[in-house]
Image (tube, rainbow, N blue to C red):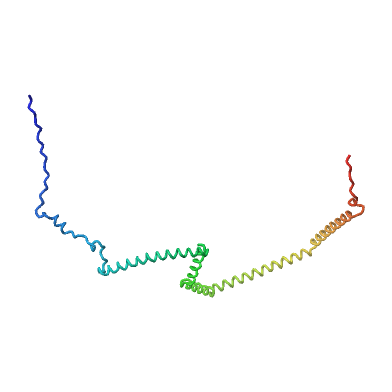
């Protein structure tokens, strides 16, 4: 019989913490001990430079009051806007009427504003300076003279045309043409009168009564 073989023993290495270097024992514990516990003062942002803690607290309290007042005013404004819309609806006012009113008020505000008044005064001063300048006066005189010359030229052209027409009517050619037109006109009037007399004569065919044609 064969002897039963036993498996070899396996030894696992044990990991032991390495000894701390000399002088470093208790360093982590000391560090954790030195960390301060957070409080309300440390959680709050640091105060700006030049302000004490009392001044910072006073400013923060005032800021909270102002924000609360702003929220209250917004609620009041929203209620007033709703009431205004109901009144406009009852009066039959449309958004277009409101827009016209706002534009009119805005234009009135612009007209009474200091900037608009000053601008109007500046424009008036510039207008006076321009109209009183020598260049403007010379330009105005030049335009006036040019207008007078143009009127005179047109008047001369009209006189020349009238004189030419008068000369043409007094010419022999125009008189001969006028005589021919008169002769043609008299002939046309005479022929029209003769045709009218023929229609009203007793022997005309228009005075005979109509005859009835009997059917075959």
Which residue is painted at 59% across and 70% down in the image?
Answer: 143
Q: Is residue 153 left or right of residue 51?
A: right
Q: Is residue 166 left or right of residue 99?
A: right
Which residue is painted at 65% across and 69% down in the image?
Answer: 151
Q: Which residue is situated farthest in the top direction here? A: 1
Quadrant position of the C terminus in the picture: top right
Q: Is residue 136 above or below residue 5?
A: below
**Residue closest to the eye, 98 or 138:** 98
Indicate the position of residue 40 as horizontal and vertical percent values: 24, 62
Q: Is residue 25 left or right of residue 39?
A: left
Which residue is painted at 40% across and 64% down in the image?
Answer: 75
Q: Is residue 105 above or below residue 177?
A: below
Quadrant position of the N terminus in the picture: top left
**Residue closest to the eye, 21 or 126:** 21
Indicate the position of residue 159 as horizontal and vertical percent values: 71, 68
Displayed quadrant of residue 68? bottom left
Indicate the position of residue 212 as horizontal and vertical percent values: 89, 45
Q: Which residue is situated farthest in the right direction here? A: 203
Task: Report the number of discs.
Answer: 0
**Residue closest to the eye, 91 or 63:** 91
């Amino acid at each position: 019989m064969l002897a039963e073989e036993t498996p070899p023993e396996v030894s696992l290495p044990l990991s032991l913490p390495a000894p701390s270097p000399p002088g470093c024992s208790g360093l982590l514990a000391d560090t954790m001990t030195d960390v301060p516990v957070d409080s309300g003062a440390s959680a709050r942002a640091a105060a700006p430079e030049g302000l004490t803690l009392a001044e910072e607290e006073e400013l923060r309290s005032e800021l909270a009051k102002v924000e609360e007042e702003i929220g209250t005013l917004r609620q009041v404004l929203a209620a007033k806007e709703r009431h205004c819309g109901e009144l406009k609806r009852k009066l039959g006012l449309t958004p277009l009427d409101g827009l016209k009113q706002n534009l009119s008020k805005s234009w009135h505000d612009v007209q009474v504003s200091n900037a608009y008044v000053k601008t109007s005064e500046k424009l008036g001063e510039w207008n006076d300076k321009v109209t009183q300048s020598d260049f403007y006066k010379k330009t105005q005189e030049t335009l006036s003279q040019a207008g007078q010359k143009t009127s005179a030229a047109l008047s001369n052209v009209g006189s020349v045309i009238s004189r030419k027409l008068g000369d043409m009517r007094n010419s022999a050619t125009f008189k001969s043409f006028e005589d021919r037109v008169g002769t043609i006109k008299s002939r046309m009037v005479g022929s029209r009168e003769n045709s009218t007399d023929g229609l009203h004569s007793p022997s005309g065919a228009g005075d005979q009564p109509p005859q009835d044609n009997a059917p075959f």
